[in-house]
Image (cartoon, rainbow, N blue to C red):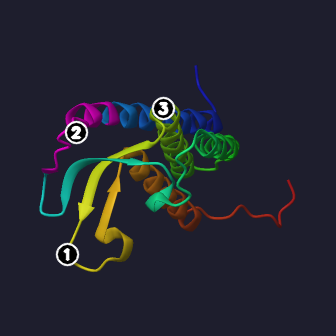
Amino acid sequence: MSFSPATRRRWLGFGVAALVLALDQASKFWAIGLLGGPERPVIALTPFLALTLSWNRGIAYTMLRSDGDLGRYALVGVALIAVAFLAVWLWRARGPAAAAGFGCLIGGALGNASDRLVHGAVADFLYFHTPFSLGPLSNYVFNLADAAIVAGVALLLYDSLATPEPDKTRKA
């Protein structure tokens, strides 16, 4: 059985989304078990990366912080609406990089949204820090869903620059 290129791209994108979601949730389960105790350890991995558990009740850099259920469910609703739009764009993706990029965005958004539903906040545990002034990246705690979202944006930028536009002057 042979699938069309569009079908293969869709399978790729939704497969990437499922893989990102599964890896994100597994890593958070592991991190909460390791770092979520009363002593809340910080485990240094390198001079610039450590493991520590931080609960984010907002979005990036704790913006739009919401401690109440209404705000939490509003953030989940916004994430689900975004996922619906991203799924439509994934369905229409022209290349494998775009499909994988949309898959990363979908999986990351669903991973963080499920944290909000289950825990009331997003579990961040990868602590990037540096003594150099790098703006907000000088002191940043994130998770695999966040990393997948950044990777998804990078893939979409690559796709937009590397994929030629279809010739719209010719009639089909």
Q: How crowded is mark 1: few (under 14 residues within 10 Å), some or many (20 or more)?
A: few
The residue shown at (29%, 66%) is: 139
70 sits left or right of 45 in the view: right
**The N terminus: image quadrant:** top right
Q: What residue type is labelled 2?
A: Leu
| Direction right: furthest residue | 171
Q: Is mark 1 on a helix, strand or loop?
A: loop
Question: For mark 3, what is the residue?
Answer: 18
The residue shown at (42%, 45%) is: 145
Q: Is mark 3 on a helix, strand or loop?
A: helix
Question: For mark 2, what is the residue?
Answer: 35
Q: Is residue 12 visible from the viewing direction of this image?
A: yes
Of labels 2 and 3, earlier in sequence is 3
Q: Report how far apart the C-alphas of labels 2 and 3 lie in the structure.
A: 25 Å
Percent coordinates x, y for residue 66 in the rendering: 55, 50
In the image, which residues are magenta? 28-43
Q: Nearer the viewer, mark 3 or mark 1?
A: 1
The residue shown at (44%, 61%) is: 61
